[in-house]
Every structure is written in structure tokens, then in C-alpha cells.
Image: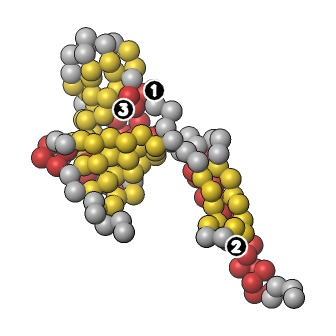
Amino acid sequence: MSDSPQWTAAKCVADEAETEFCTLVASWGAVAGVKAIGRQPGADLAVMLQIEIKADGKAASTGNVALEVESRGRPSGLQTTRAALWAIRAGREWIVIPVPVLRKLAAGAPVVGAAEANRVALVPVAALRPLALVVKRGAAT
């Protein structure tokens, strides 16, 4: 039994979307491990990437996420991460954002802290939301 012309056309569109999404994910830093798997039970795309998890207990009250960028005078945290994404727990939500986007936001943010200790960029939560996937905590089932 052969596939209908309509199904074949829809499949071409879906394949193109998978390739586009792979390119998008790869641009976040997930160079190795991005692979379209096509027809597989239960999934269209297998993606392996590193995600940095951060819990900022003060973000809800300050309105800022503190992102480490330096430790003892050397780049650290956001500046040296090999992760493709950062998932930040801020108050009652998770903010998932590509590292290159987060680095751009942090570059324009005030940096605080003593030079001999950790220094952090204070990025407004409101600046993150439009550029990230935001999920209310407890919403996933």
C-alpha cells in the first residue's frame, strides 16, 4: 500500500520542520547529539543537550535573577558553561532560555559582588520572559 499524495506532502513539511528545529537547537550549543529520527514510535525528534539548572530563591522578591559570571577574578558560571540551555527556577515558574540569549542579556546587566569572591549579573526576570519558555511550577503533569 502506497502513501497518499496528501500524506506525502504533509510528511515533507514535517521533515522540513524537524530539520529546522534541529538547526535551532544546535544553535543553542547542542552541536553533538541533535538528530532527527523520523518515524519512531512516540517521537519525531531525539535531542541530547546539556541544561544548567539554577534555583534563585530571591528572584520573586527582587525581580532579578542573579547569574554568576565570575569567581575570584576568573570567568565562571554563565561565562564558562557548556550547557545549551539554562533552566532557572524563579518563584513559581521555570524559565528555560538558550545560553547565547542569556549571555547577551547578562552582558547588559549590572554586575555586583566583590572581585575576590563571586560576581553576579542581575538580569530582570521581566527581560527573560519574552525570550524564554516559561512554565508555571506544578503545571507539568
Q: Amino acid type of disc 2?
A: Val
Question: Does 19 sit left or right of 129 as displayed?
Answer: right
What residue appears at the point 72 percent right and 65 percent down from the top-left corner? 38
Q: Amino acid type of disc 1?
A: Thr
State how far apart marks 3 and 2 are (Cα).
38 Å
Secondary structure, mark 3, is helix
The answer to whether residue 95 is above or below residue 100 is below
Secondary structure, mark 1, is loop
Q: Amino acid type of disc 3?
A: Ala
From this viewpoint, is residue 17 visible? no
Q: Upstream in the sequence, badge 2 or badge 1?
A: 2
The residue pinned by badge 2 equals 13
Circles 3 and 2, Cβ within 8 Å, touching? The answer is no
Say the numbered circle drawn on residue 107. Answer: 3
What residue appears at the point 34 percent right and 58 percent down from the top-left corner? 134
What residue appears at the point 36 percent right and 69 percent down from the top-left corner? 141
State how far apart marks 1 and 3 are (Cα).
14 Å
The answer to whether residue 13 is above or below residue 49 is below
Say the numbered circle drawn on residue 38. Answer: none
From this viewpoint, is residue 58 visible? yes
